[in-house]
Image: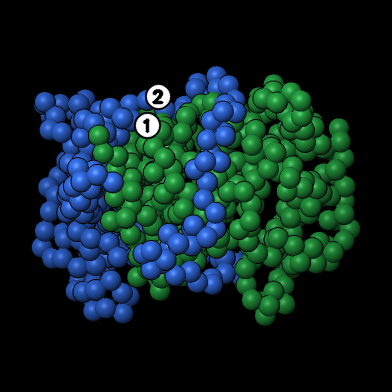
Chain colours: A blue, B green
Amino acid sequence: MNTLRLSFIIISVLFSTQLLAADKLGTLTRDTELRKAPSKSADIITILSADNKVRILNRQGGWYQVNNGIQAGWVRLLTVKLYRKNTIALPTPKNTDEEDEDDLLGNLATGREQSDEVTAATAVRGIDEEVLQNAEPDQEALKLLDQYAADASTGQAAAEEVGLKNKKLDYFGADKKPTPAPKPKVEESDDDQGDWP
Amino acid sequence: MKSISLKSAAILLFALLPLTVMAIDIGGFGAMIGGGSDDEQEGVNLDLNQIFEGAKDIGRTVSGISEEEEIEIGRNAAAVLLGASKPVDDVALQRYVNKIGRWVVSQTERPDLPWHFCVLDSSHLNAFAAPGGYVFITKGLLDTMSSESELAAVLAHESAHVLQKHHVKAMTNFSNSGVSGLLKLASQTQGAQGNFMATELVKEVKEMYLRGLDKDDEYEADRMGVIIAARAGYDPFGLATVLQTLDSINPDDETVSLLFKTHPSPQARITELEPVLITLDDTGAQPQLNNRFIASTTTPE
């Protein structure tokens, strides 16, 4: 790997990590305990009511660290619905017309810089119904897949490289019947342009 | 039609011999879904859900498809997908996704299938699987992710479709000629003809991907996917955050047109998954692995 490529990766990692989970916005879908730490046994700071708007600062497991403009703490991940017009780190639109904003909706907050290069690299036609309908089987491309394939020991090495440890865990079984989750109290409103924390 | 008679036989057998069905369920692959310990399985609940699961499994048994046949159908299905979208021309990226995928499927009940993973050069957001161990994810979907735990979760969801043979089920359920016809078509693609692929099989594969899988099979793959990701040592909430991202996309956006047409809504999937995720609270401290993911998926220009 040459120095230039390495530098690029390091810069990318630093930049992207800095953006990670930053500036994601969401709305609480139900009344939710705001806790001091990402644990159900952590102290409760307060109860945030459904429809509270929050800025997502971080994530650990099933918890988001959020700030509602008054307080910061941790809420259950699934109590948050991401804001649909969540378009951070995008090139600044030339104007803020509704139509232009809509055009950006595909570029969601990903913690990545959406550079022109990325756009160019991925600006191929996607797989939609028409493309799939007209597809001719590609046996040559199928052969490429054999070149990419990894064996089990290579997968194991990739896990060990970062200290991933496997564990025994049963599938969610019929004996543990799902109980219906609480229904969201509020529906997301696309047009809600209120103040975000 | 042969398929109808086979299904009828299955139903008859199931109706007459419920205890036999349950025995097959417990002894067969279906037991894995229940997943519980021996103690849990001893207390077989003769409720409708259990019986329904048993019926589904005997359906699979009757289909009688061998692993070789499954792989052959999968090769053909994969070739069709690759005809719609080429692999991203980045060997390092493809190798990375294969390493992660292979580690993930090593935690499943079918670690020895010839697993292949591939990033498709498509700006649309989607992931696919094909029977026998083919798993595809689009570059568009990969670009919305920020951690390896999200990638692992999506690969785990797709591999669950392979484990459960959801595609074979979907194709035989809708095929005019049933499983025997499907196998005949797949076998026609082999031999001296080389690259020839039966037109009828191509058509059936396309219809399957355009129609999508059974809604309940998608929910099942979600439930299994988070467990498989947790088994592999990842923070299993990666699938939830991917679904939240999908949920935040305007459904009219063309990049999600096929995904949204062929899957239950992201919000419905999140709701179905919540009871499973609650049981995984303790695994939440497992790593997300942001840095390796970003270093491995960022293509320098």
Identify the residue at horizontal 74%, vertical 59% (top origin). Answer: B54
Residue B276 visible in the shown view: no
Amino acid on which the number 2 mark rests in the picture: Arg
Question: For mark 1, does the 10 Å Cα neighbourhood hold few (<14), some (14 to 19), or many (20 or more) residues?
Answer: many
Residue A96 visible in the shown view: yes
Please tell me in which quadrant of the rendered image residue B196 appears.
top right
Give the CA separation, mark 2 to mark 1: 7 Å
Q: Is residue A182 left or right of residue A88?
A: right
Question: For mark 2, does the 10 Å Cα neighbourhood hold few (<14), some (14 to 19), or many (20 or more) residues?
Answer: some
Q: Secondary structure at mark 1?
A: loop
Disc 1 chain ID = B
Q: Secondary structure at mark 2?
A: loop
Query: Residue A72, image x and y in percent?
Result: 15, 65
Label 2 sits on residue: A125
Label 1 sits on residue: B123
Q: Residue furthest front?
A: A2
Amino acid on which the number 1 mark rests in the picture: Ser
User: How many badges with numbers are in the image?
Assistant: 2
Identify the residue at horizontal 36%, vertical 64% (top origin). Answer: A162
Mark 2 in CB contact with mark 1 (< 8 angstroms): yes
**Residue A96, above or below B281:** above
Query: Residue B34, image x and y in percent?
Result: 64, 66
